[in-house]
Amino acid sequence: MKRIHIHVGVEKLDESIRFYSAIFGAQPVKTKADYAKWMLEDPRVNFAISTRASKNGVDHLGIQVEENEELEELRGRIRSADLAVFDEGETVCCYANSEKSWVQDPSGIAWEAYRTMDDAQIFSSKLAADESACCPDRPVSKTQCCEPSEKTAGCCG
């Protein structure tokens, strides 16, 4: 089953957790010093906030799947539409071990198609290597959009 993913950049995590907890009527299922996540069933959404985003507001969107077959189906639809895609493969991002691909919509909003396998204790495995957070090593579109930065939470934010 699929779930929409929304990642929002915030300045004040504690205030934002209080706000979104009130809106959703639920507490986050995961909270770190720089990150919080709600896994809601109604509406079915994985809603995350962090202070690592490249800007305040919507950083990136996505579709989270539960099974590898669903991920391959989604990737197939992206490829058959002849969209520029970056298959990141297995990675650590947002305190989770995931397999993901990135694509950009015509407005430049980054979308990830991904499957989470397990929790992780670090925000990103790439932080130690290049100081970026979850931005693919290569751009996801022909426009060379991706500029890795210390605060990038998604891609091309």
Image (cartoon, helix red, strand yellow):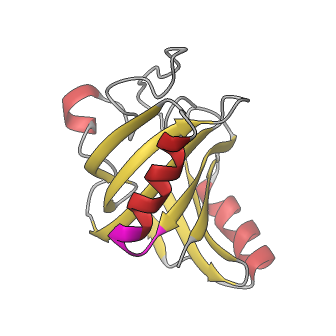
Q: Residue at x 69, y 61 (%)?
A: 15
| 83 to the left or right of 18 | left
Quarter of the picture containing the C terminus is top right
Q: Is residue 13 left or right of residue 90?
A: right
- Span shown in magenta: 65-69
Q: Is residue 76 above or below residue 109?
A: below
The total number of labels drawn is 0
Is residue 151 highlighted in magenta?
A: no
Where is 70 relative to 145, above or below? Answer: below
**Magenta segment: does it hold 67?**
yes
Spot occupied by residue 2 in the image (x, y as percentages of width and height):
55, 72
Look at 72% across and 84% down and name the residue there: 42
User: In the orientation shown, which residue stands out farthest toward the left?
Assistant: 129
In this view, the residue in front, 45 or 103, is 103
Q: Quadrant of residue 109?
A: top right
Give the residue displayed 43% in from the left and 23% down from the top. 139
* Closest to the observer, 29 or 61: 61
Q: Quadrant of residue 107?
A: top right
Q: Can residue 5 be seen in this snapshot?
A: yes
Seen in the image, is 92 located left or right of residue 18? left
In the image, taking residue 45 as reference, residue 102 lies left or right, namely left
Could you say where residue 130 lies in the image, as x and y percent from the top left? 26, 26
Q: Position of residue 43 (x, y in %)?
A: 73, 79
Closest to the observer, 67 or 15? 67
For this orientation, the residue located farthest to the right is 23
Query: Is residue 34 in sight in this rendering?
Result: no
Find the residue positioned furthest to the top.
Answer: 143
Q: Which residue is drawn at the image coordinates 57% and 54% (left, top)? A: 62
Q: Position of residue 44 (x, y in %)?
A: 66, 78
